[in-house]
Image (spheres, rainbow, N blue to C red):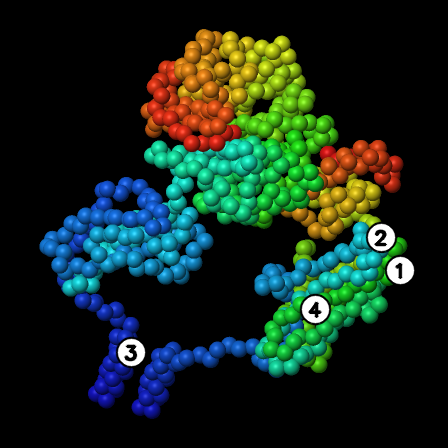
């Protein structure tokens, strides 16, 4: 009996030994206290911008219980691009408490974003603390107005940066092997374009009378020839405008060649996107001649995303990615205007102070100037045609350019050395400034946030036969032309301008 | 009793100890080599769709051959020598191997697990008025047995079968109503010939899905029709209807 009991005890012991292997260790939960470090940098609240060769200085604050003698410091840079490898190595760029670093072009590439990591390690415990900065490496052409100039024998670009620095000869110096002449248009897409042809980003185009190119917006060097922009290039090379239009998230490339429209439809679907064959008119023919301008809708859901104007038959088109459409009678108040037959010439389409209404300044067959206003979408049964108004604005139809305010119901234009402000609501005008007698205003542009959110800017470009100038005017809250803020000289004849940001 | 208990104990301990043993890897037996058409996905260029409807009708006269590729993949280990693959035609097939088409280099190369074999199609005279059908099946040979199989589905044949048709007749593409009618309207042979000329596209049994590509096709077609009508007047098809594009 005792033997049996012993034996059962033996079996139970063996089983207990085996089972004990499954028992979870309670572990050692006695931790040593560490001295925590908090890293802050209140001097940097947003993304950093740096140019290759420039100095990058950072001085983050450390909060710790003790001194910094026991600490080691490291600064790393990671390429923070969607195209970057997940297994990429970081680059150690400094081991100092504060960063005082000359941006090395062999480490940082223009146009790329980086994550800059500040690593602070307690030598005694080996515990590390981290702080991250977002760094964008850019060039000197980052933000500012870019001007397309006709310099008689060549086209060129100049820039006025946000700080007021003027950079001339940008195109000719960066593209000595591809000179352009007789320029007509310079555009920058208002949104980033993903066409799987070039790198994602905004698109920059220079158009001349017989050629056009796409520029790299970072380096301002030629990226693509005109023909490369097409799936099948047209036999006649006669561009007049290239740009991107459409409401938010509804981008389409707009290219006018020989007066005909070619469209580049982009979106989230795969494959290369380029400009296609010309679009036929709503009648199925190609009997139209487009004005070199366009106006867009606002929202993705807007019924009408892109408006264009046929100079030959004096009509507007509703531009769809694969067709030019006429406007249904049901969406128009024909007592105001028939967009399919306006019987007036277009001077300029522009935005207005109401973000769902667009302006079209027209010259009637009676030589009077008119303002048409229309909406880009409709609710229920309402019509999109808003108004047709005859304008008491002297010389407006003879002005080389005009611009509409996006703050108040005003139109600005210049003629015969005078800078006018026309007020739509009161049908009245004032002369806000008089240029030197020798200067002709070639381009004019309203910039809503020219001086931050608080004040708008009016930009007037003049030409005296040998030199172009740029005038910056402050615009008062009531829309009147305020003081002349700055004058910039040394330009060629400015034929177009666009804001780069 | 004692012996019984000892045996019982040993059994229990053995059961526990057994769980610590390492299993051998489950390997495919190398004495059963097989081969099949990999169909469900295309990886590294290997993989094939089920059926091809091949037509010479839109090709110029100087085009006398065309080529399709058949992908094969093996089961089992690769061998250090080339291994011929055997294909058979079903009785329902009307195309003749060796006359209407040949399979060039029909073997699995040494040390390879998959291969694409070119099938060269000949533009024989009899194709002018008929559509011939080839139903290829993988057959057992000295080197391979038919491999991984699965039932046919509505959209795919099993992995031992591959079908294609060849013709020199102009025929309405099978996907016209589903994929092209919304772009180009009603079908006619005349329209198809001119669409091919205007757009440069000729694989009408394969759909074009992406908007930018479809836009390009309709833009080119409209321009082509407009220019034709400017030069020649309306384009009339074989049914005496005017060719129009929506």
Q: Are marks 1 and 3 on the same chain?
A: no
Please report contact status of discs 4 and 1: CB closer than 8 Å, yes or no: no
- Against B82, residue A356 (above or below) is above
Badge 4 is on which residue? B117
- Of the residues tagged 1 and 3, which is closer to the observer? 1
Residue at disc 4, secondary structure? strand
- Against B31, residue B169 (above or below) is above
Q: Is residue A427 left or right of residue A54?
A: right
Q: CA separation, marks 2 and 3?
A: 79 Å
Residue A18: which numbered mark, if any?
3
Query: Closer to the N terminus: mark 1 or mark 2?
Result: 1
Please name the residue shown 43% across and 37% down the image: A168
Badge 2 is on which residue? B169
Task: Estimate how packed mark 1 is, as few (under 14), some (14 to 19) or many (20 or more) residues with alpha carbons within 10 Å.
Answer: few
What is the chain identity of the residue bearing mark 1? B
- Against B46, residue B222 (above or below) is above
């Amino acid at each position: 009996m005792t033997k049996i009991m012993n034996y059962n005890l033996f079996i139970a012991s063996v089983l207990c030994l085996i089972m004990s292997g499954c028992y979870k260790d309670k572990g050692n939960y006695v931790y040593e206290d560490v001295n925590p470090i908090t890293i802050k940098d209140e001097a940097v609240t947003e993304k950093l911008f740096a140019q290759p060769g420039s100095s990058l200085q950072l001085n983050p604050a450390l909060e710790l219980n003790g001194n910094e003698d026991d600490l080691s410091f490291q600064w790393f840079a990671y390429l923070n691009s969607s195209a970057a490898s997940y297994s990429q190595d970081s680059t150690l760029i400094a081991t100092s408490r504060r960063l005082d670093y000359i941006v090395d072009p062999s480490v940082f590439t223009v146009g790329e974003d980086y994550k800059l990591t500040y690593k602070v390690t307690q030598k005694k415990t080996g515990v590390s603390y981290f702080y991250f900065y977002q760094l964008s490496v850019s060039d000197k052409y980052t933000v500012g107005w870019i001007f397309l100039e006709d310099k008689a024998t060549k086209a060129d670009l100049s820039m006025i940066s946000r700080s007021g620095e003027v950079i001339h000869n940008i195109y000719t110096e960066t593209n000595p092997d591809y000179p352009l002449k007789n320029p007509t248009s310079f555009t920058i897409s208002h949104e980033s374009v993903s066409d799987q042809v070039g790198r994602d980003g905004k698109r920059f185009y220079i158009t001349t009378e017989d050629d056009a190119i796409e520029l790299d917006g970072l380096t301002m060097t030629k990226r693509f020839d005109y023909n490369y922009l097409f799936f099948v290039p047209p036999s006649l090379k006669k561009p007049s405008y290239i740009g991107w239009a459409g409401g938010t998230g509804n981008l389409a490339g707009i290219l006018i060649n020989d007066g005909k429209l070619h469209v580049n439809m982009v979106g989230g679907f795969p494959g290369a996107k380029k400009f296609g064959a010309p679009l036929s008119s709503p009648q199925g023919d190609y009997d139209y001649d487009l004005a070199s301008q366009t106006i867009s809708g606002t929202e993705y859901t807007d019924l009408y995303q892109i408006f264009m104007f046929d100079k030959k038959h004096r009509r507007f088109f509703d531009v769809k990615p694969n067709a030019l459409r006429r406007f249904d009678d049901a969406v128009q108040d024909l007592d105001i205007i028939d967009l399919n037959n306006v019987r007036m010439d277009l001077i300029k389409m522009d935005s207005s102070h109401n973000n769902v209404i667009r302006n079209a300044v027209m010259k009637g067959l009676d030589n009077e100037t008119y303002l048409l206003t229309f909406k880009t979408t409709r609710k229920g049964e309402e019509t999109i045609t808003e108004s047709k108004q005859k304008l008491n604005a002297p010389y407006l139809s003879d002005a080389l350019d005009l611009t509409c305010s996006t703050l108040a119901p005003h139109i600005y234009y210049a003629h015969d050395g005078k800078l006018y402000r026309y007020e739509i609501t009161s049908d009245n005008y004032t002369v806000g400034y008089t240029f030197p007698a020798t200067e002709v205003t070639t381009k004019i542009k309203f910039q809503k946030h020219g001086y931050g959110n608080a004040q708008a800017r009016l930009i007037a470009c003049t030409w005296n036969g040998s030199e172009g100038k740029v005038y910056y005017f402050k615009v008062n809250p009531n829309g009147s032309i305020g003081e002349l803020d700055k004058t910039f000289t040394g330009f060629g004849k400015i034929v177009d301008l666009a804001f780069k940001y | 009793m004692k012996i019984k208990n000892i045996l019982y104990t040993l059994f229990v301990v053995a059961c526990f100890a057994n769980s610590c043993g390492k299993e051998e890897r489950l390997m495919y037996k190398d004495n059963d080599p097989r081969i099949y058409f990999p169909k469900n996905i295309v990886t590294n260029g290997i993989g094939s769709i089920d059926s091809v409807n091949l037509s010479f009708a839109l090709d110029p006269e100087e085009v006398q051959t065309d080529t399709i590729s058949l992908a094969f993949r093996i089961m089992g280990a690769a061998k250090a020598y080339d291994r011929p693959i055997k294909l058979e035609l079903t009785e329902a097939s009307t195309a003749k191997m060796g006359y209407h088409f040949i399979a060039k280099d029909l073997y699995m190369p040494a040390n390879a697990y998959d291969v694409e074999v070119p099938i060269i199609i000949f533009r024989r005279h009899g194709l002018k008025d008929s559509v011939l059908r080839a139903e290829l099946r993988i057959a057992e040979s000295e080197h391979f047995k038919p491999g991984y199989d699965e039932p046919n589905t509505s959209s795919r044949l099993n992995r031992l079968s591959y079908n294609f048709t060849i013709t020199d007749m102009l025929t309405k593409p099978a996907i016209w109503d589903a994929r092209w009618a919304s772009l180009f309207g009603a079908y006619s042979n005349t329209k198809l010939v001119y669409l091919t000329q205007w757009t440069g596209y000729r694989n009408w049994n394969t759909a074009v899905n992406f908007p930018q590509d479809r836009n390009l096709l309709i833009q080119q077609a409209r321009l082509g029709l407009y220019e034709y009508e400017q030069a020649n007047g309306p384009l009339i098809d074989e049914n005496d209807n005017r060719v129009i594009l929506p």
